[in-house]
């Protein structure tokens, strides 16, 4: 249990920051596209508190870490009103893409920190601090890649349901958009329980390995 508590104190701040930036980027791009809803509702902020869902952001992930179980978490979705967009389909595509893209950018930055620390960290830090930075940067790398790839799954309420809509004919896009988020959430939970969703680890590990090696020159 002591190891899990230590892991929680390392993992949770990174997790919370990553979710906050993810949601902020949704709101920021929506604002730039003409929708002020997130700004008016106080969600266009890097303060994590407005983005926290008590169950999905706190209870569920903490319980999963401490007692084992399915790692399943979420934040409060940033409110978006497509009626404010000039080009509804394309603007919604960019708003949806902003979240996963922000996580990939964080993963890229984390890989850079990892590579620089492995190669040069001993020059200005002691061995203990070097190991801490390496552990945190790798944790951030894998976590943000997981958030990125998971949110690209084309099921509501995930971002992928809106991203893929931009690439589909109108009839198929309408069918995907009409899937009730609650139904999509139940499908996702079923995929978790069945173990099928574990295959998302394949692109995560491939991307993480590539990014780790990218900065190891």
Image: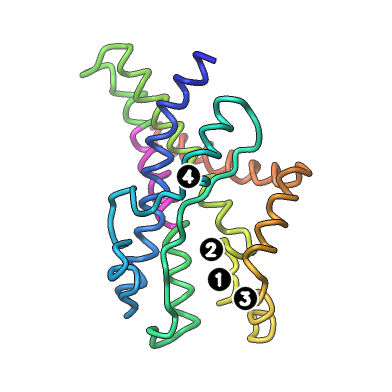
Comes first in the chain, label 3 or label 2: 2
First-in-chain label (3 vs 4): 4
Q: Residues within 10 Å of mark 3 (few under 14, many from 20)?
A: some
Secondary structure beneath dot 3 equals helix
Mark 4–mark 1 Cα distance, whole angstroms, equals 22 Å
Sequence-first tag of 3 and 1: 1
Quote the CA–CA distance across marks 3 and 1.
7 Å
Residue 25 bears which disc, if any?
A: none
Residue 197 percent coordinates (x, y) = 70, 46
The residues bearing labels 1 and 2 have C-alpha atoms spaced at a distance of 6 Å
Q: Name the residue under label 3.
A: 177
Q: How far apart are the alpha carbons under marks 2 and 4?
A: 17 Å
Q: Residue 107: x, y in percent?
A: 43, 44
Estimate the spatial distance between the alpha carbons at disc 3 and disc 4, rounded to whole Å.
Answer: 25 Å
Label 2: few (<14), some (14–19) or many (≥20) C-alpha neighbours in 10 Å: many
Residue 196 horizontal/vertical position (percent): 76, 46
What residue does disc 2 label?
159
Q: Circles 1 and 2: CB distance less than 8 Å?
A: yes
- Magenta-drawn stretch contains 100: no
The residue wearing badge 1 is: 162
Q: Which residue is drawn at 75% across and 42% down?
A: 195
Of the pair 214 and 34, the residue shown nearer to us: 34
Query: In the rendered structure, which segment of residues is drawn in magenta?
Result: 101-113
Which numbered disc, 4 or 1, marks the residue closer to the eye? 4
Work out whether 33 lies above or below 210.
below
Pick the quarter of the image with the N terminus. top right
Residue at image position (36%, 66%) is: 27
Pick whichever, 83 or 121, lies toward us.
Answer: 83
- Image: 11 above or below 89: above
**Residue 57, disc:** 4
């Amino acid at each position: 249990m002591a190891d899990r508590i230590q892991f929680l104190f390392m993992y949770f701040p990174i997790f919370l920051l990553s979710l906050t930036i993810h949601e902020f980027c949704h709101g920021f791009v929506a604002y730039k596209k003409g929708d002020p809803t997130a700004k008016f509702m106080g969600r266009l902020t890097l303060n994590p508190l407005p983005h926290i869902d008590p169950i999905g952001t706190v209870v569920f992930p903490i319980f999963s870490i401490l007692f084992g179980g399915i790692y399943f978490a979420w934040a409060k979705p940033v409110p978006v009103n497509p009626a404010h967009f000039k080009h509804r389909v394309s603007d919604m595509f960019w708003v949806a893409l902003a979240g996963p893209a922000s996580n990939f950018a964080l993963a890229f930055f984390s890989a850079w920190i990892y590579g620089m620390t492995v190669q040069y960290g001993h020059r200005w830090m002691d061995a203990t601090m070097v190991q801490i930075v390496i552990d945190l940067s790798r944790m951030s790398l894998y976590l943000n890649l997981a958030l990125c790839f998971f949110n690209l799954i084309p099921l509501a309420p995930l971002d992928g349901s809106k991203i893929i809509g931009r690439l589909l004919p109108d009839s198929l896009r309408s069918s995907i958009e009409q899937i009730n988020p609650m139904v999509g959430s139940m499908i996702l939970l079923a995929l978790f329980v069945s173990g099928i969703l574990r295959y998302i680890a394949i692109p995560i590990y491939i991307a993480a390995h590539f990014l780790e090696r990218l900065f190891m020159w």
